[in-house]
Image (spheres, grey):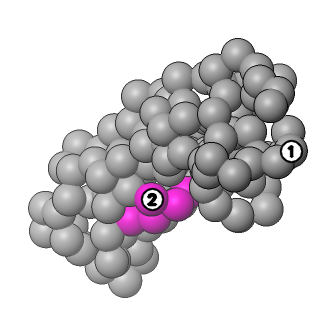
């Protein structure tokens, strides 16, 4: 058996290659291929990896409920004024009727008006 290296684990006990080494829950593999603590406003499942951000593959760091991220900055979380406006998950995800291009889902879509959490 060979060690995965600092901070890495395997998802299964039958792992047979270095490809099976992943970051544990609460961390993600950064550009330098090291495990880094999941940032505030995010959830990081086992094997979360920034290389999956561009390919839209999972697992990858995802926004917690009450936060939103933008496609342009997927590792920068914005806390929403009203947590219900931001369900979390993938970048640019907002409550139905909210403008997903606005910071923290703060604006309504053009054909809607603001009624608190919903538009």
Q: Position of residue 92 (x, y in %)?
A: 52, 60
Q: What stretch is highlighted in magenta?
A: 89-94
82 horizontally vs 47: left or right: left
Q: Where is residue 7 in the image (x, y as percent from the top left)?
A: 64, 21
Q: Position of residue 105 (x, y in %)?
A: 38, 56
- Report the residue that reaches farthest toward the left: 116
The residue drawn where x is 70% and y is 33% is: 29
- Up-down relation of residue 95 to residue 103 (above or below): below
**Please, what is the dominant secondary structure of the magenta stretch?**
loop
Which residue carries the number 2 mark? 89
Q: In which quarter of the image is the N terminus?
A: top right
The residue drawn where x is 33% and y is 77% is: 96
- 54 or 15: nearer the viewer: 15
78 horizontally vs 95: left or right: right
Circle 2: is it few (<14), some (14-19), or many (20+) Cα within 10 Å? Answer: some
35 horizontally vs 81: left or right: right
- 14 or 104: nearer the viewer: 14
Structural distance between the alpha carbons of marks 1 and 2: 31 Å
**Label placed on residue 17:** 1
**Upstream in sequence: badge 1 or badge 2:** 1
- Up-down relation of residue 8 to residue 97 (above or below): above
The residue drawn where x is 32% and y is 57% is: 86
Q: In which quarter of the image is the C terminus?
A: bottom left
Q: Can residue 6 be seen in this view?
A: yes
- Based on the picture, tell me whether residue 91 belongs to the magenta stretch: yes
């Amino acid at each position: 058996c060979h060690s995965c290296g600092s901070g890495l684990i395997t998802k299964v006990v039958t792992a047979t290659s270095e490809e099976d080494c992943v970051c544990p829950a609460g961390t993600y593999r950064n550009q330098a291929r090291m495990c880094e603590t999941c940032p505030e406003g995010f959830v990081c499942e086992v094997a979360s990896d920034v290389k999956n951000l561009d390919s839209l593959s999972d697992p990858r760091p995802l926004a917690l409920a009450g936060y939103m991220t933008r496609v342009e900055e997927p590792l920068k979380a914005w806390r929403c004024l009203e947590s219900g406006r931001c369900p979390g998950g993938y970048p640019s995800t907002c409550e139905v009727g909210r403008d997903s291009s606005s910071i923290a889902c703060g604006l309504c879509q053009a054909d809607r008006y603001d009624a608190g959490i919903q538009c």
